[in-house]
Image (tube, rainbow, N blue to C red):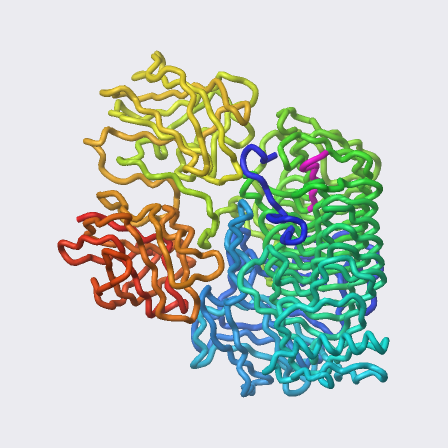
Amino acid sequence: MTYRRSTAVLAAVTAAATGVLGLLLAGPAHQAQAAAPATTQSALTPFAAGAANGTGASIPGMTEYEAEGPQASTNGTVIGPDYTQGDLATEASGRQAVQLTGQGQYVTFTLTAPANAFDLHYAVPQGSSGDLSVYVNGTKLSQQLPLTSAYSYITTGQVPGSKVHKLYDDVRMMLPSTVNTGGTVTFQVDAGDTALPYTLDVADFFDVGAPATQPANSVSVVSEGADPTGAADSTNAFRTAISAAASANEPVWIPAGTFLVSSALQVPKATIAGAGAWYSQIRTNEFIDNTSDVSGPVNLSGFAILGSTVGRHDDSTANAINGSLGSGSTVDGLWIQDTNVGFWLQYGNTGLTVKNCIVLSTDADGLNFNGNATNNTVENNFLRNTGDDGLALWSYPAADSGISLSDNTIVEPTLANGIADYGGSNNTIQGNVIADTNPLGSGIAVSNEAFLQPFTPLSGTITVSDNTLIRTGAMNPNWGHPMGAMRFDAYDSAFTNVTVNVSGNAVDDSPYSAFEIVGGGGQGYAVNGLNFTDNSVDWTGTTVFQAETPGSASVSGLTASNVGVAGAYDYGYPNDVAGTFVFNQGSGNSGWSTTPTLTAFPSPVGLPPTGPGNGTGSPTPTPTATSTSPSPSPSPTQTTPPGGNLALGKAVSDTGHTQNYVAANAVDGDPNTYWESTDNAFPQSFTLDLGSATAVDHLVMLLPPSSAWGARTQTLSVLDSTDGSSYSTLVPSATYSFDPNTGNTATINLPAGTDTRYLRLTFTANSSWPAGQLSELQAYAPSSSATASPTPTPTPTATAIGSTDLALGKVVADTGHTQNYVAANAVDGDPNTYWESTDNAFPQSFTLDLGSTTAVGKLVMLLPPSTSWGARTQTLSVLDSTDGSSYSTLVPSATYSFDPNTGNTATISLPAGTTTRYLRLTFTANSSWPAGQLSELQAYAP
């Protein structure tokens, strides 16, 4: 329902097929039990909750402990629970974590099972790295635990609605000896541990067996020259070993050690085995890259792929396992961490089994079948902290069919869904545990969202059974309303020729609704063929069902308790008809109802019960999609017109509006919220009350800045009144153009001398949607009475400058930059985009070309205004040149302070009489990150 507003790109597909990314042990019995009471179920870790329901992964020798849980003690601070996009607690397991803010603070885990290794899920501030001390039974280990933010804090400006996410990472360590049951392991901030604050989410302890030995008749990579110390590049040795093993029809052996593989391997057929994922470690971002259908099988087992990706790579260059593994392959017991994607499987995969693997902290998907996949099984795997869908089936460019995703545990996908089935036929999602999803996703999504063509929609029978969903569903900032724990989405086409059987699932502690039925593309495509049988729901923030598109479903044996809001949201879009979705109720339903029929999205009754701490749900206001993290969005911001915005926060009214897109949204100072009139009912009016008769020079109309909205025109007239009763035409009807590439704004100049209290805009046409739309209406006094620069967004901005920014949009250059943080970001007028020089390479320079010799009095440097950036200093000098070749020092090296609490800006006063064309800032230090950083460089005349 967002195509004319802002497309919800859940899988973030941005390139052509060969380079597309980012949609983005004993197995337990498939028998989901009725949900336990909320306060009991919420007190369990995802693994414990799955075990209680007979679902999810069972990893031999692994025991999981929450930092705020009953097996932990701390003198730190428990943060959360929270559901705010981009918040540390929101991205934590159980929506809570422990933060250590000073020396002597600790978290101690008392073990309930023996362990000789652990993996710690943690966060440190963006730009920080440092050690953390480890104690076993009170004795400090000589080995420190190295923590870093280098692989966290992912920005995906190509995904509308995303914020900085994947705030956590993982670090693992083998202990000197086994810690017995009842023993303790402590993580403590000691002197020299400086990456404060440390946020600890969860620790997974492992009882790791002895390394496997080399099988007979196998080819060791070491015998072919591989370096087990990791000092030398072993890529060629691996290739030689694979070739030799293929000739001899023998397996490849990776012994214990750490091996550097600097470029991906092409492996059409092989068996590659290691001594165990804790022993055989491969340092690479992409181990296998088969870019066409191979014969297979490619069997992989018993080793770890430990990457070092910085930022998301949507070009398939940093996927641990990429492409085809052919027919009949088995992947068993891999550990994949800090790569872009765990498994991106495309071109051809048939009869493949992926089992007993651990995939942690990827920048995009955990595993994605990208078309041409048949009769594959993904079972008993553990995935956490993926930067996109945990597990996904995407039927592009051909169908995925007969795929089984079963008995997996998926925790904390930081964007998109736990499991998503985008098209295809006869696929099964069964017996999985999914917990703590974040914005732009549900726990499970069954969807006809295509992303690219040719796409094969859903067909045959899709089975969604015996899954356990905990605290899943999230606010969709593009839609302005929530996504349910389980979502059925006719995004690009209707559900036809498909039956979706939803049975035996337990949906617990959803912050919003349990089941959402929607046409996410905004075309109102129907969802039919849904059968809900013997599901349980325990605790919802709102309703059990949230239906937003036509269609029907049969429902029987659905038992619900602790339902937050009575009735069902059942309001079709875009037809705006109540009761448009039909629920055919059979026997055995209890604890919920489809009445009353709700036509506005209800507010949640509070936060769900917390994770494994001892807290309970908080009756706090609705979780929002507002972020406290710096926004990487490339969306242009509106140019700030002169004068104070007279309309901000004033009383407004309308002749009608759609859903919750009310008039007040257009005067709240947030360009991402908006008013939309009643659809298909022109003319429609929006009236502003300035409170008293006021001199007004011009109006500025804004639409949301995201390019996903698309260009459009709106036709309207402006009327005014001094008493709110009798109106006369002030500006005759005219057509105004809105283009997101130039700010998505339009200005209406009022007749000279206009002095009025009430201003009414009457809309009669919109080229893209049958309604009037405004994200903000701003009103400005004549320039003679202007007092201060308006702020069209809620983002704190720098102190207003009384002259034009000479640098805005000018040509800039740098000596180097990191990823897509290019120099142009610092002159685009958006304080949320930024330039970052090459890391760890001081000195680094940023050069501004003013276009011609110009008088300049001062420079203003900005960093993103969010407080999550943190205060810092940067040391730099300013040089200038008139010809771009010969530079001289204009301002000697000095240290400048940036503090988000005071705008995150610093001003450089230039020598009197400075007239120049080229200005160069040369950075030599940054107290928080080893690079120069600027979100804007502004230049002003004297």
Q: Is residue 491 magenta?
A: yes
* Depth check, front residue: 139 or 567: 139
Position in image of residue 95 (x %, y %)? 58, 58
Residue at image point 25% right, 56% down: 883
Would residue 12 be seen by someone viewing this image from the given angle?
Answer: no
Q: Judge from the rendering whether residue 732 lies leftward or rightward of residue 406; answer left or right.
A: left
Would residue 416 be seen by someone viewing this image from the given angle?
Answer: yes
Position in image of residue 224 (x %, y %)? 72, 83
* Depth check, front residue: 307 or 774: 307
Above or below: residue 664 compared with residue 810: above
Residue at image point 69% right, 27% down: 579
In which quadrant of the rendered image does the N terminus lie?
A: top right
Residue at image point 80% right, 57% down: 349
Q: Which quadrant would residue 912 be assigned to in this image?
A: bottom left
Region rendered in magenta: 486-493
Position in image of residue 337 (x %, y %)? 63, 68
Q: Which quadrant would residue 731 be assigned to in this image?
A: top left
* Depth check, front residue: 110 or 280: 280
